[in-house]
Amino acid sequence: MLANMTLLNIITLYVMCGIIFNLAYDLLVSGIKDESLRFNHMQRLGVTIIWPVYAILFIINFIKTIFGNDKK
């Protein structure tokens, strides 16, 4: 599949994944109703560009939060 994709297609797919990650994060922030966690415009741009790093950090912290509360 990747052999048939042009560079423009790969870049478009990468940016779309970043936009979808931003959308999912915004929906999560809206769901927990904590506006202090919402990204500003520059942070959104940064997340769109390096979204895999933010996705990995989000997953790690999510797992720590879920399983870390059992130590009480």
Image (tube, grey):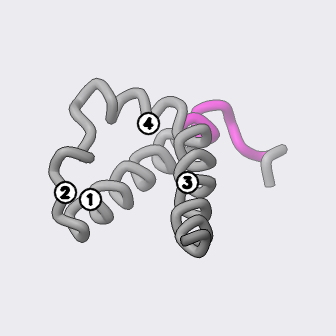
Q: Residue 6: within the magenta? A: yes
Nearer the observer: mark 1 or 3; the answer is: 3
Counting residues from the N terminus, which is met first, the one under dot 4 or under dot 3?
A: 4
Counting residues from the N terminus, which is met first, the one under dot 1 or under dot 2?
A: 1
Nearer the observer: mark 4 or 2; the answer is: 2
Identity of the residue drawn at 58% across and 33% down: 8
In depth, the one of 13 and 50 nearer the eye is 50
Label 2 belongs to which residue? 34
In the picture, measured across the screen, residue 59 lies left or right of residue 45, that is: right
Amino acid under disc 2:
Asp
The answer to whether the residues at label 4 and label 2 have Cβ atoms under 8 Å apart is: no
In the rendered structure, which segment of residues is drawn in magenta? 4-11
The answer to whether the residues at label 4 and label 1 have Cβ atoms under 8 Å apart is: no
The answer to whether the residues at label 1 and label 3 have Cβ atoms under 8 Å apart is: no
Quarter of the image holding residue 3?
top right
In depth, the one of 53 and 62 nearer the eye is 62
Label 4 belongs to which residue? 48
Counting residues from the N terminus, which is met first, the one under dot 3 or under dot 2?
A: 2
Q: How far apart are marks 3 and 2 (CA)?
A: 17 Å
- x then y, percent, for residue 14: 56, 41
- Secondary structure beneath label 1: helix
- Secondary structure beneath label 3: helix
Label 3 belongs to which residue? 61
Amino acid under disc 1:
Val
Q: How far apart are marks 4 and 1 (CA)?
A: 17 Å
In the picture, measured across the screen, residue 44 lies left or right of residue 18, that is: left
Q: How far apart are marks 4 and 2 (CA)?
A: 21 Å
Amino acid under disc 4:
Thr
Q: How far apart are marks 4 and 3 (CA)?
A: 19 Å
Quarter of the image holding residue 29?
bottom left
Amino acid under disc 3:
Asn
